[in-house]
Structure formats: C-alpha cells, structure tokens
Image (cartoon, rainbow, N blue to C red):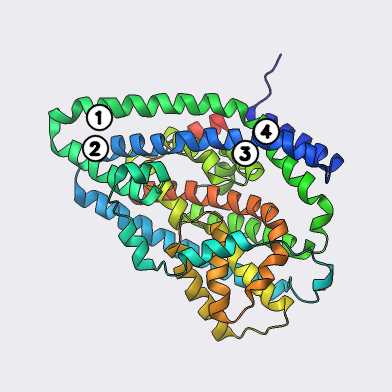
C-alpha cells in the first residue's frame, strides 16, 4: 500500500480543520479542545529552531574559513535582501493603486477588532531605530539572547564562535565534532516532529475558522484577493525572474518546497519550516556556511511577503478613509517602510507593529488597522509562503553568486 506523502497529510489536515471550524463556528468548546494541540506543535518547532541555527552556523562558519570571506558573504546577502524587499514594497503599492481595494468600502459593515496588544508593542518599539537594530545585533549576554530567541544576536555570536574554532585549528576539532553531532541530532528530531504536522495544522486552522468564520472574509474580500494576487505575481514574476537570472526555475523550487509551503501556509508561521528549509537547501548543494547564515538572517531582513502586504494595507486604509496619497506621499511611505520593516525586525506581530509605526508618520489613521485585524491571520498565511520562497531563493542566489554549483538532479528526484 502506497504511503501518503507528508504534503498530502498536511493538506488533508488543513481541509478537515476548515470543515470542523466551519461546522462549529462560534463554539468556544472547539477552541478549548483544539488550541492546546496547535500550541504544542508550534512550541515543539520553536524548541528546535535555536539549537539548529547555532550548531549549523558554527559548523558552517568553522568550515568556511576566514573573516574576509564571511564579510563578503554578509555584504552580498544584505544587499540582495534590501533590493528584493524594496521591489516587494513597490509591487504592493502598484497593486493597491491599480485595484483600489479600499475604495467604496462601507466601514459600517466591517467588524472592528481590538488592536491594543499591537499598539502596546508599537509603543515599546517606536523609539527603536535602525541604529538600535544594528547595536542589538551584538549581545551582552548570549545566554539571555538564546533564551529570548533573539536571532540576530544568536547569528552574530555563532559566526564569531565559528571563526574562533577555525582559528585555533586542531584544538577546535572536538568542539566542531560536538556541534556537527548536535546539528545531525536536531535534524533527526525535526523529522520526528514533522510527523505531527498534519495534526498541528488541523488544530490551528480549525481554531482560526471557528473563531472568525468564513463570512468574515466577505466585506474585505477585495483586499484578500488583491493581497493574494499581488503575492502570487511577486513569486511567479519577480522571484521567477530572479531565479531565472540565477539559472534556476521558480516552479522547480516551489515543487521542491511543497511540504514546507503547505505547512507554512496552514500555521501562518515561517518558524515552523526554518529547520526543514535549511536541511533541504543543503541537500541540493547550498554550502552549510551560506544556508546557515542567509536563511536565519532572512527571517529578520528579507520578509518579502510582509513588506508587500504592509504597502497594500497602508494604501487600503488610506483609500477606505478617502485620503488621496500623492506620488510624493507614496515615495515617503516606501522610505519609511524600508526603515521600519528592518528597524523592528523580530518583534511579535511584526507586520501590524510596522504598520502602526508607519501609518501615523504619513498621515494615515492607525485606527483603520482595527478593521483588518480580524482577517490578518488569513493574510498572514499568504505572507508566510512568500517569505519561505523568498528566503529559500536567497540561499540559491547567494550560492550561485559565490560560484558554487547546485545539484538540480536532487530537486527532480525529491519533487
């Protein structure tokens, strides 16, 4: 009997979760039963992210060599991230200007959602500038950074530690051997946890649908369609063109990552697939030093889906309130988003917090976010998929840029 693939298992879990959520819409009992299952699955994934990033990065850097080559890698990576995220902002603005998702929306038919938690987070981070972000990359206490999951600080320490191991030569071999074993063990643990993915997806999507219902999409249907359409365009056209320039096929990459895309979409969390993406990128020939640096860093600096959504959401709210934004205002919006989306990277609910930090500075009422907070989960699912494809492609682009070859045959065999 042929075994059902993980992608199909997750898809079945997704479909069953939607059905159960729709049947028990408004039933608090369903949320009470399903929420713990989904939460446990997300916690299992978060449990393994930091050990995998630390061990993989240390092993990769120690094997990569000198500080000069790592500095070159970091410079290329950040340059690529900035170019792609800026293009994502312009794609979002173009989509919002062409399709006008906020025009003619009757606010009386929209359900307002409480956004106090986002406002509190925004207030805590509003003084957090781009300079602060770079300062905080250097940890004062690595144990505290590990406990808080502060990814940029963890990456910085792991890179420095890896360089130190490489510098001491043979004396560093036992430490390197330990981290190699740790990385292998954690990838095994990842594969075991992934067996629970269909159950986790079923619970998470069931809770979402039972809370908000499918009918919550109707008043904001045009916004959902524009966001999803813009994101599909961005993946197929923009990232497709980037992949082609790098000598790759975006469709081949999507087929290869189908399990991770379905899981990321269902859970609306990029973290759930971080270990698997790193493993898969290494399997097709991306060096460990590149994979373990580019992908975790991309989770803070290369959120293509998030920046694209923020541009659309900002104009949607302006259109909803009847505020005309000139080309000058929109250019200002681009510049502000370029800074705020990096300046508070790693903050929980980052897309909403970025919007709260951005809207006021360009004269758009922040209260408008309360109308779209209810469907943010639906939009977050799409953002997650774009972020996954964008970060995976980044590893391929940087690998090619560094002059390494990939194993295309492995994608064909697995996909």
Looking at the rendered structure, which numbered label has been put on residue 263? 3
Dot 4: what SS?
helix
Q: Are marks 4 and 3 in contact (CB under 8 Å)?
A: yes
On residue 176, the disc is: 1
* On screen, residue 366 above or below 14: below
Dot 2 crowding, Cα within 10 Å, few <14, some 14–19, many 20+ = many
Nearer-N-terminus badge (2/1): 2
Residue 233 vertical placement versus 181 (above, below): below
Dot 2 corresponds to which residue? 62
Mark nearer the N terminus (1 vs 4) = 4
Other residues around mark 4 within 10 Å, as few (<14) / some (14–19) / many (≥20): many
Q: Position of residue 316 (x, y in %)?
A: 69, 72
Check disc 3 and report its element: helix, strand or loop.
helix
Left or right, 181 with reference to 46: left
Q: Is residue 208 left or right of residue 165?
A: right
Marks 2 and 1 in Cβ contact (< 8 Å): yes
């Amino acid at each position: 009997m042929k075994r059902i693939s993980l992608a199909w298992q997750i898809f079945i879990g997704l479909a069953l979760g939607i059905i159960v959520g729709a049947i028990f819409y408004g039933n608090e009992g369903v949320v009470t039963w399903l929420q713990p299952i989904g939460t446990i699955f997300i916690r299992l994934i978060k449990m393994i992210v930091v050990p995998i990033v630390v061990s993989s990065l240390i092993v990769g850097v120690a094997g990569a060599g000198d500080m000069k080559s790592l500095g070159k890698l970091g410079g290329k990576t950040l340059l690529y991230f900035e170019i792609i995220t800026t293009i994502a902002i312009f794609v979002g603005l173009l989509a919002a200007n062409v399709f006008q998702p906020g025009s003619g929306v009757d606010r009386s038919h929209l359900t307002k959602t409480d956004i106090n938690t986002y406002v509190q987070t925004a207030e805590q981070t509003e003084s957090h500038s781009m300079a602060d972000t770079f300062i905080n990359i250097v940890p004062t206490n690595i144990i505290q950074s590990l406990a808080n999951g502060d990814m940029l600080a963890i990456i910085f320490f792991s890179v420095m530690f890896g360089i130190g191991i490489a510098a001491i030569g043979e004396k560093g071999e036992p430490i390197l051997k330990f981290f190699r074993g740790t990385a292998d063990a954690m990838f095994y643990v990842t594969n075991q946890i992934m067996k629970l993915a269909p159950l986790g997806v079923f619970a998470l999507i069931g809770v979402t649908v039972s809370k908000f219902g499918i009918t919550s999409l109707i008043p904001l249907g045009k916004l959902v369609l524009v966001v999803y359409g813009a994101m599909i365009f961005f993946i197929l056209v923009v990232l497709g063109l980037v992949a082609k320039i790098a000598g790759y096929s975006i469709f081949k990459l999507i087929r290869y990552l189908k399990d991770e895309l379905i899981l990321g979409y269902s859970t609306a969390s990029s973290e759930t697939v971080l270990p698997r993406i790193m493993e898969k990128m290494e399997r097709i020939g991306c060096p460990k030093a590149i994979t373990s640096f580019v992908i975790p860093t991309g989770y803070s600096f290369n959120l293509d889906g998030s920046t694209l959504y923020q541009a659309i959401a900002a104009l949607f709210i302006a259109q909803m309130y009847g505020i005309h934004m000139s080309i000058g205002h929109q250019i200002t919006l681009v510049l502000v988003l370029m800074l705020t989306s990096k300046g508070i990277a790693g903050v929980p609910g980052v897309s909403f917090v970025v919007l709260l930090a951005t809207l006021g500075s360009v004269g758009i009422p922040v209260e408008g976010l309360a109308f779209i907070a209810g469907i943010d989960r639906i939009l977050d699912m799409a953002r997650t998929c774009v972020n996954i494809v964008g970060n995976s492609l980044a590893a391929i682009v940087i690998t090619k840029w560094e002059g390494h070859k990939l194993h295309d045959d492995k994608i064909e065999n697995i996909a």
